[in-house]
Image: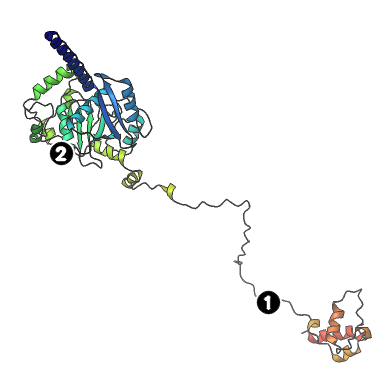
Amino acid sequence: MRCVGTATIAVMLAVVLLVGSSSLATAATDRSLKLFFTHTGERATITFKRGGKFDGRGLGQINRFLRDWRKNEPANIDPRLLDLVWEVYQRSGSNDYIHIVSAYRSPGTNKMLRGRSRDSGVAKNSQHTLGKAMDFYIPGVKLAKLRSLAMQMQVGGVGYYPASGSPFVHLDVGNVRAWPRMTRKELARIFPNGKTMHLPSDGRPLPGYDLAVADYRRRVGAKSIEIASSAGDDDSNFASASSNRSSLVTAMLPTGRSRAEDALELQTSRPAMVGEQRSEFTDLSFLAIPVPAARPTSEMETPEVEVASLGPITDRTQTDSFRPSAILDLPAPAALIARFPITAADRDADEEADGHETLMTWALSAPEASTGLTAPLISARLFAIRTTQISP
């Protein structure tokens, strides 16, 4: 009886352990990412793998989350990229959100970024447009540590941008490469046994390079083998193995600023900053420029301009024959005026008779009007005599 009871307990414990280990195995194969998109401000924890298999619903959520935020176009993220980011995140030991700086870029956005500047740093066939690249950082984790962890994976490309406006690392699932290259000493610190496909800055591979290539061939297959390179940009299209081989002379050449860093600044910078970089362009749409008034329906009349004659000035002393009439200057003799018969009706009792005023009234009156006086018969003869005396 005691043996039966002991056996029963053992079976029950075995079942519990089996179920528990199965649950732990299932939980271990579920993969989730805590994501924070810096451009949209969205946060989410998305499970993209369940039971060791990619979850369609989770992948759809990530595609919407990592959309092209400029055009609101959903992404088509390569699931291998999610596995790579998850592995690096697990090895970092962080529980914080992964802060995404750049992920998917639509072809239209990629073309726009390339057109902003000749040296925009955006590759024509960018890995970002294929959903195979992600730029990110994790608060509390040193950027150098993230780079080392990603390079140890030896899965794809690793870019390091500590001096960018928003420091980040670049990961993609293209051919194995890293930029900028580490020194031989730095690379040996990450790979003490020398087993790496990454090349140091001197261009000479570490001792375990061939072993690393063989291991990579077993993991991904011989057809997709691409030796390490130090491509100048983060997301250029795949290159052939022969074109990726770098010589010692190439490694010693000075390396300019990476195009990826320039591309990131174009993506994350404010429009005002871009305007400052291109100072030759002035946007007049923000200026309050007065608008001219409507054109009048009729034009204003322009007065004619009188121009002085250009001919010779004539001698007015020779041509001017005007002489004032003697009648205008003829003084009215008091004796003659006294003889004018003036009716009593025209006299003013309160005023003295004014011969000059009366004479002028008569002279200016109409022929049919009666002025109350009659010119003397002697006046015509008198005027003629006076005119004769005045004439030369």
Name the mark nearer the viewer: 1 or 2.
2
Name the kind of residue labelled 1 in the image.
Answer: Gln
- In the shown orientation, is residue 197 left or right of residue 36? left
Marks 1 and 2 sit apart, C-alpha to C-alpha, by: 102 Å
Q: Which mark is residue 254?
A: 2
Q: Quadrant of the N terminus?
A: top left
Residue 10's x, y, as percent? 14, 13
Q: For this rendering, which residue is in front, 332 or 292?
A: 292
Discs 1, 2 touching: Cβ within 8 Å: no
Q: Which mark is residue 318?
A: 1
Is residue 48 or residue 345 the one in the foreground?
48
Q: Is residue 345 left or right of residue 220?
A: right
Q: Which quadrant of the view contains residue 365?
A: bottom right
Measured from the top left, where is residue 232 in percent x and y?
20, 33
- Secondary structure at badge 1 equals helix
Say whether residue 294 is left or right of residue 279.
right
